[in-house]
Image (tube, rainbow, N blue to C red):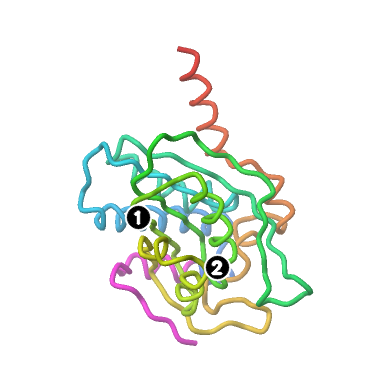
Amino acid sequence: MTRHYSAIATHEVQHLLTVIADKSTSHQAYQQAMTDLGQHLGTAMLDAMGHPPTSHHIYLVATAEDADFLASGILKQLEAHLNSVGFACIWNQRTSLFGMKPLAVAPILKQYREPVEQVDTLIVVKSIISGGCVVKTNLQNLIQTLQPQQIFIAAPVLYHTAEASLRQVFPADITNKFRFFYFAQDHERTEQGEVVPGIGGMVYDRLGFNGQSDKNRYTPSIVKQRRQMILESRKF
């Protein structure tokens, strides 16, 4: 097992990574650790922006399973410093063509997208990036309508070939905008495709969902709250 920590992985972050890698960690403790890791990622990205003015426009996209935890932690940090933070939540159905892991795809079943007029920085977040099919699908979907100046791709854990795999998919005018934020890079993956130590297994199960189908029936609390806020703002 080989793991390399990035420069932004503090001692506290490394402890949180140990918590999520431990398969005996409870669902509640796992959820809290992911939320805390999101706050640390949010801080790192704010630092990378060079303390931008409050007029800086951010758009964060997360998967349904990450929305209430990892993404919620990031949003908390961003919204504490910036006035314009848009959010999108995407429900992906990850599957393998012909049962082959290298041919994994992640079509979008549904999505929640907040309307925005301008995006300076697009942030695509995932609990772990291994093959990159979910990030690729969601990014391709978003850049059809958004024209961000920079694209942050963030995850607590990255498989060591993930960045190169994603860069191969997009043209140079898009990849030149990429900047990756992660705490740990792992170099081992089991025959079943699980990154080791990674995030301690399949994130759906670790967060308390009963597999992928269950999480795709779930509407994150953060989506409900933000949708209600938008509806109420339109009444005035």
Q: Earlier in the sequence, mark 2 or mark 1?
A: 2
Residue 83 point in image, percent of width and height: 31, 35
| Nearer to me, 87 or 175 | 175
Tell which residue pokes out farthest to the top in this image. 236
List x then y, in percent, for residue 74: 40, 50
Q: Quadrant of residue 189?
A: bottom right
Q: Residue at x 46, y 58 (%)?
A: 33
Considering every residue shown, the one lying at the far bottom of the view is 1
Q: Check the picture and name the quadrant holding the C terminus.
A: top left
Q: Residue at x 25, y 37 (%)?
A: 54
Q: Is residue 25 highlighted in magenta?
A: no
Q: From which residue to which does the magenta span run?
A: 1-19
Residue nearest the observer in this picture, 172 or 2: 172
Which amino acid type is marked by label 1? Gln
The residue positioned farthest toward the right in the image shown: 98
Q: Which residue is mark 1?
A: 150
**On the picture, is 197 further left or further right than 185?**
right
Kind of residue at badge 2: Gly
- Residue in the image at 51% along x and 59% along y: 126
The answer to which quarter of the image holds residue 84 is top left
Question: Residue 197 at what x, y percent from top left?
Answer: 52, 77
